[in-house]
Amino acid sequence: MEINVLPLFSFVLVLVSTATNVLSAQVTVNVDLHRSRNTITDRFIGVTIDSVQIQQSWVADSIKSQKALNVARALSPSFLRVGGSHADSLNYAFTHSGHSHNDLTAQQWDTINAFVKTIGWDFIFDLNALQRNHDGSWNPDNARELLKYSAAKNYTIAGFELGNEYENYPSNFHTTVTPEQLAKDTVVLQSVLKEFPHYYSSFIVGPESSAGYPGHFQGFLQAGGWKPIRAASFHHYYFGGSHHNLSLFTDLGKMNYFAQHLDSVFKQSGSVDPRLPVWVSETSSAFGGGVPNMSDRFVAGFLWLDKLGVCAVKGVESVHRQTFYDRNYSLVDKNFNPNPDFWLTVLYKRIIRGAVFDVTGRDDVRVYAACANTEHFPGGSLVVYMLNPNKSAVTFYLPQLEHQPRLRYSFTAGDHDGLLSKFISLNGHKLELVNDKVPDMKPEAAPLGLLTVPAYSYTFLVFTQAQVSICLH
Ligand SMILES: *[C@@H]1O[C@H](CO)[C@@H](O)[C@H](O)[C@H]1NC(C)=O
Ligand SMILES: *[C@@H]1O[C@H](CO)[C@@H](O)[C@H](O)[C@H]1NC(C)=O
Ligand SMILES: *[C@@H]1O[C@H](CO)[C@@H](O)[C@H](O)[C@H]1NC(C)=O
Ligand SMILES: *[C@@H]1O[C@H](CO)[C@@H](O)[C@H](O)[C@H]1NC(C)=O
Ligand SMILES: *[C@@H]1O[C@H](CO)[C@@H](O)[C@H](O)[C@H]1NC(C)=O
C-alpha cells in the first residue's frame, strides 16, 4: 500500500511550556514524496587527504595495520581525493630518488596506490597545475611521467583534478592563472589522458576553486572548462580554524548561508550547462586545518550533517570531507580511532541511497528525507533525519507517517564533555571500535506518536513499511 501523501503544509510551531518551564517546540513535518530532487549514490560522500600526507609514513604504516584498514573500509565504497595546496608544489620524481620535500618519490606513489587498492577506494589525484611553460600554459610533461609510470604499474586512477584553489595563486605562489588559461589547460589534460589506455576513461573535475569566487568558478566554466569535466567542483568551509567559537558550530545562519551559496553555485554552473553535475570536492567546518578541539568533536556533526542534507536536496552529486586523516577536522585520530563524524558518515553511507525529497519547513529546525538503502531495508523504506542544534528539545509530528512503524538512530554526545565530547552515542551507547573493528550500528524501534529529538542531538528515522513508490527499487 502506498502511503497517502497529504498536501504540503508549512511547519506549524507550537510552543509548549513544560513542567520544568523549559520551552520545547513541536514541529509538524511533511515530505513531498512525489518528486525526487536528487539521487544519492554509494559515492555521494567521499573523503580527502592532503597531498603532503602521501609523503608521510602513516600511509605505509596503515597498510600494515588491520585497525586502520578496518576503519577505512567501513567508508567504502568511496572516492579518496588527494589534493590541496601542496598539490601545486609536488614534483613527480619517479626516475631518480627524490631530493627536495616537494619530490614525490616512486615509493611514495606506490604506497598510496597500494593503500587505495587494498581498501577499495576510488582514487582521485590532484595534479600540479603550476608546472608551466614560458607562455603561461600548463606543461604536462611531469604529469605524463606520472601517468606513464602508473600505467606500467597498472594503477587504477578514477579521476584527476588540475590544481587547487587557483584564485589563491597570487597570494600563495605569487603567480596568476586566469580562468581562460585553466580551462585551456584542462582541455590539454583531457587529451593527455587519452594518450593512455589505462586513463582513457578516467574523469576530470574542476576548477577546484573555493567558495565565493564566481569569476573563477563560473569564469572557468564559461571559458570552455565545462567541456572536459565530469563535474563542476568547488570547495567550501564555513569559517577559519582560528575561530574558537563553539556557537558557530550550531549556528543556523551558517547553515542557511551555505544553502544560499549552493543556490548561487548551481545558478553559475546551470547558466553554462544545466546538466553539469556539481561536486563539493573539498569541504569541512573550518579552513586552515579546522578548529582545535571542536572540528573533531561531537559538535562538528551539526554543520556536517546539515551540509549533507543541503547538498542532497539541492542536487550535489558528491561531497568530499576534508579530511580522512590528520589535522583537527579529521574523521579518525592519529591512532585510527574514529572521531564522532566518522560514525555519522558511515551511518549516512549505509542507510541512505536513492531519491531525495523536499521537506517543507522552517529554517530553524533542519529536517531532510531520502530513500533508505534497500541493501539494508525493505524496498520503499524512507529515511527522515532531523537535527536539533538548539538547547531545548524539539518534538516532531509527521502526519503522513503517523501510523508507520519506524526505527530510530539517535545520536547524542558520547560523554559529559557534551558538545566538546570526543565521543558520540547511538541510542544511548557510546560508539567505539570493538577489537579494532567497526561494529554494526543498530537502530532501535521507536514507538508511534510524537518524536522528541533531545537538545543538541540528531536523529535518523527509518520507516521500513512506508512503501514509498519512488523508493521501491
Ligand atoms: C530553541 O530554543 C529556544 C529556547 O532556548 C526556543 O525559544 C526556540 O523556540 C527553540 N527553537 C526551536 C526550533 O525549537
Ligand atoms: C590491471 O588492473 C585491472 C583492474 O584492476 C585488472 O583487471 C587487470 O587484471 C590488471 N592487469 C594486470 C596485468 O595486472
Ligand atoms: C561566536 O559566534 C556567534 C555566532 O554563532 C556570534 O554571535 C558571537 O559573537 C561569536 N563570539 C565571538 C566571541 O566571536
Ligand atoms: C585542546 O585540548 C587539549 C587538551 O585536551 C589542550 O591541551 C589544548 O590546549 C586545547 N587546545 C585549544 C586550542 O584549546
Ligand atoms: C590542531 O591544531 C593545532 C593548532 O594548529 C595543532 O597544534 C595540533 O597539532 C592539531 N591537532 C591535530 C590532531 O592535528
Image (cartoon, rainbow, N blue to C red):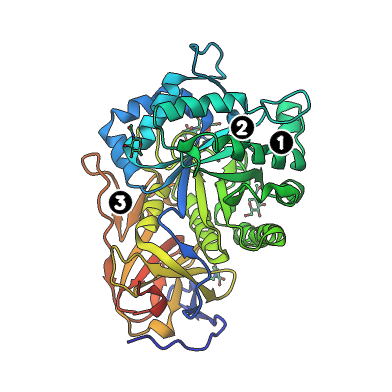
Dot 2, how many residues are within 10 Å of its Cα: few (below 14), some (14-19), or many (20+)? many
**Label disc, if present, on residue 168 of the rendered structure:** 1
Labelled pair 1, 2 in contact (Cβ < 8 Å): yes
Task: Give whichever of 138, 299 is nearer the camera.
Answer: 138
Amino acid identity at mark 2? Ser
Q: Nearer the viewer, mark 3 or mark 1?
A: 1
Q: Secondary structure at mark 2?
A: helix
Cα separation between marks 3 and 1: 41 Å
Residue 272: percent from the left, percent from the top?
A: 71, 58
The image's mark for residue 85 is 2
Query: Of callouts 2 and 3, which one flags the residue occurring earlier in the amino acid sequence?
Result: 2
Left/right placement of residue 391 relative to residue 251 reads left
Residue 126 sits above or below residue 9 on the image: above
Front of the two marks 2 and 3: 2
The answer to the question of whether label 3 and label 1 lie on touching residues, with beta carbons closer than 8 A, is no
Say whether residue 397 is visible: yes
- Inspect the image, locate mark 1, and give the three-letter code of the amino acid beneath it: Asn
Amino acid found under the numbered disc labelled 3: Lys
Q: Residue at x 75, y 35 (%)?
A: 177
